[in-house]
Image (spheres, rainbow, N blue to C red):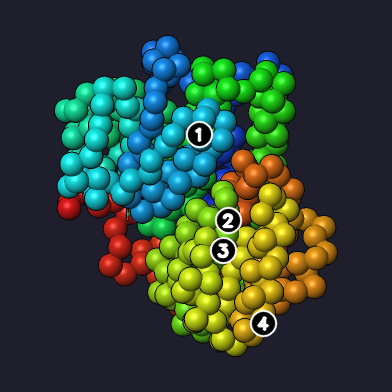
Amino acid sequence: ELLEKGGFDHFMLKEIYEQPRSIRDCMRGRIYPNEGFVQLGGIKEYAEKLKNIDRIIIVACGTSWHAGLVGEYLIEEYARIPVEVEYASEFRYRNPIITEKDVVIAISQSGETADTMAAIEMAKEKGATIFGVCNVVGSSIPRLTHAGVYTHAGPEIGVASTKAFTAQVTVLTLIAFYMAQQKGTITKAKMVELLTELDLIPEKIQRALESNDLIKEIAAKFKDSRNCLFLGRGSGFPVALEGALKLKEISYIHAEGYPAAEMKHGPIALIDEEMPVVVIATKNSSYEKVISNIQEVKARKGIVLAIVTEGDTEVKKMADYVIEIPDASEAFLPLLATIPLQLLSYHIAVLRDCNVDQPRNLAKSVTVE
Ligand code: G6P
């Protein structure tokens, strides 16, 4: 088993460290930075159809649903197609409006989640075109869908999803760019710029992993917390949700992810000197606004751990702890900001003596309703 873990203490840690490679594998043969071009063989049959679609519905569960929220942000930003992100379990029991012009994207690491499969069958009956974004090759969902794009992250053993999530986000980024290319909502020059940056993301993730020792020290300060709040805005919001989910899944600390601006409508009431608040405070469009959220937390004596852009000085003055990540455009922020949050929950869980790879009550794949 030690051999299988490649020298790491747990599969989860091994899988966290695999991300520079898994993301590289996911992009291989699909991006052409110099030409400003994306090729997705799995959905190319639908290239024409994509020029005329009015709406995309994303269905998924758990961590895959969080990846879907990042997908919504990217598809709307670049391809200018309206996107709805649905929990498969809710969607399947509503009477949703679906037409033949809709494209449904089902996201699933395992390709076996019962609710996601049921949502696909329903949308299919109503005539929608279904794309799958799955990790396990040959699983059930890729067989149910019309077309799809595999994430190629390799087997994920840890129950808490890490490398599969970042691979899903990578594929959704590629789908967003591909759709933008088809619809003509993006210039060649912009595509060259974005793909050149995307191509460097694996190296930047490698750099983000270098904060591991620092994160371990911070984890020691947070390990006895009973609650934890995660805040982010824009594409940082799904990152906050995923950070909170990881922490509760493996350390059993109650955690909530919130859009930073919504804090004043509820969670702010929880803040006192015992409440850690993890804030995604990188230098993106909402930077100044997030800074004022940090001030609000500090004014109530909350403990702030901020994820910041390398070289940041402003947040450092206010936050109790900071973890730096390499600079990146907002589109790629989720791929980088997720890394320290994975490591944080990992170290907290280890310090609390939790079963990191097989947390209580959870299953890797939920094949029953
Ligand atoms: C379970 C797993 C999660 C996963 C979710 C959806 O809850 O523990 O890690 O995100 O199912 O699974 P899927 O395989 O469809 O992505």
User: Which quarter of the rendered picture does the N terminus lie within?
Assistant: bottom left
Few, some or many residues within 10 Å of mark 4 (<14, 14–19, 20+):
few
Q: Which residue is mark 4?
A: 299
Q: Which sits in the foreground, 252 or 275?
A: 275
Few, some or many residues within 10 Å of mark 1 (<14, 14–19, 20+):
many
Rendered image: mark on residue 233: 2
Asked whether the beta carbons under mark 4 and mark 2 sit within 8 Å of each other, the answer is no
Which residue lies at the image location 68% right of the left edge and 49% below the top edge?
A: 285
The image shows residue 87 at horizontal and vertical percentages of 31, 49
Disc 1/disc 3 C-alpha distance (Å): 22 Å
Label 2: element kind: loop
Q: Which residue is mark 3?
A: 260
Check disc 1 and give the amino acid type: Ile
Q: Which residue is mark 1?
A: 75
Which residue lies at the image location 62% right of the left edge and 60% below the top edge?
A: 280
Judged left or right of residue 246, residue 281 is: right
Disc 2/disc 1 C-alpha distance (Å): 17 Å
Looking at marks 1 and 3 on the same chain, the residue that comes earlier in the sequence is marked by 1
Looking at marks 4 and 2 on the same chain, the residue that comes earlier in the sequence is marked by 2
Q: Is mark 1 within 8 Å of ligand 1?
A: no
Looking at marks 2 and 1 on the same chain, the residue that comes earlier in the sequence is marked by 1
Asked whether the beta carbons under mark 3 and mark 2 sit within 8 Å of each other, the answer is yes
Label 4: element kind: helix
Judged left or right of residue 171, residue 55 is: left
